[in-house]
Image: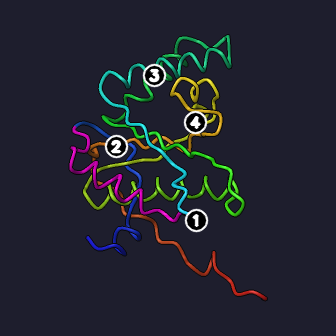
Amino acid sequence: MDALDALLNRVSAPRLRAPGPDAAQRELLFRAALRAPDHAMLRPWRFLTVEGDAREQLGELFAQALLARSADAGEEALAKARAMPLRAPLLVVVIARLQEHPKVPPQEQVIAAGCAAHAILLAAHVQGIGAVWRTGEMAYDPRVAAGLGLSADEQIVGFLYMGTPERELRTPAAVQVADFVSAWPA
């Protein structure tokens, strides 16, 4: 698959099963991430992998965060939170590491980390690995950040769920470029 094909045809794969990416595939995923645009070469990102029993631990962290946010959370909502990390054999937590820099504001650093996440998704697609980028309340919950060991200058950009797609990937819908591009001044 060439680069343009990957860019034009990558879609999320929300239903995933084992096996997840092997060691060689992971190496390529992270090598692609490290090529993301990065003003001043700050490398404002890091990644955590969550797999095996650690997924259950992450699910428990999600349930505790939900309970802290909503003391009246029912057992069904807690069970759903516990099950979230079990939707794929591998999760990659993409973290933006914000650094003081006179020319690179925090927003640019978060965007760079987002580009690294996108590079992982593209590298997964090229290798036939199903992947989906998820955020939701857990990505922004300070208890989840603390439980994952993030420092005060870090934030979660997203959770990348990866594995083998349960079904054939859909064909992306056609989008008209002219709907999103215009000349300035008009």
- Taking the spot 28% from the left edge, 51% from the top edge, the residue there is 27
Pointer 4 local density, CA inside 10 Å: few below 14, some 14–19, many at least 20: many
Q: Residue furthest right?
A: 185
Which segment did they paint magenta? 19-39
Pointer 3 local density, CA inside 10 Å: few below 14, some 14–19, many at least 20: many
Closer-to-camera residue (114/183): 114
Q: CA distance from mark 2 to mark 4?
A: 17 Å
Residue for badge 4: 139
Of the two numbered discs 3 and 2 on the same chain, state the one appearing first in sequence: 3
Q: CA distance from mark 3 to mark 2?
A: 16 Å
Asked whether the residues under the numbered discs 1 and 2 touch, taking CB atoms below 8 Å apart as contact, a structural biologist would say: no
Residue for badge 3: 59
Residue for badge 1: 39
Judging from the image, what secondary structure is the residue with disc 3 in? helix
Residue for badge 2: 162
Q: Is residue 85 above or below residue 158?
A: above
Of the two numbered discs 2 and 4 on the same chain, state the one appearing first in sequence: 4
Picture coordinates of residue 93, whole percent (x, y): 46, 39
Between disc 3 and disc 1, the foreground one is 1
Of the two numbered discs 1 and 2 on the same chain, state the one appearing first in sequence: 1
Between disc 4 and disc 1, the foreground one is 1
Between disc 1 and disc 2, the foreground one is 1
Of the two numbered discs 4 and 1 on the same chain, state the one appearing first in sequence: 1
Judging from the image, what secondary structure is the residue with disc 2 in? strand
| In the image: residue 184, left or right of residue 153 | right
Looking at the rendered structure, the kind of residue marked 4 is Ala
Looking at the rendered structure, the kind of residue marked 2 is Met
Picture coordinates of residue 176, whole percent (x, y): 55, 77
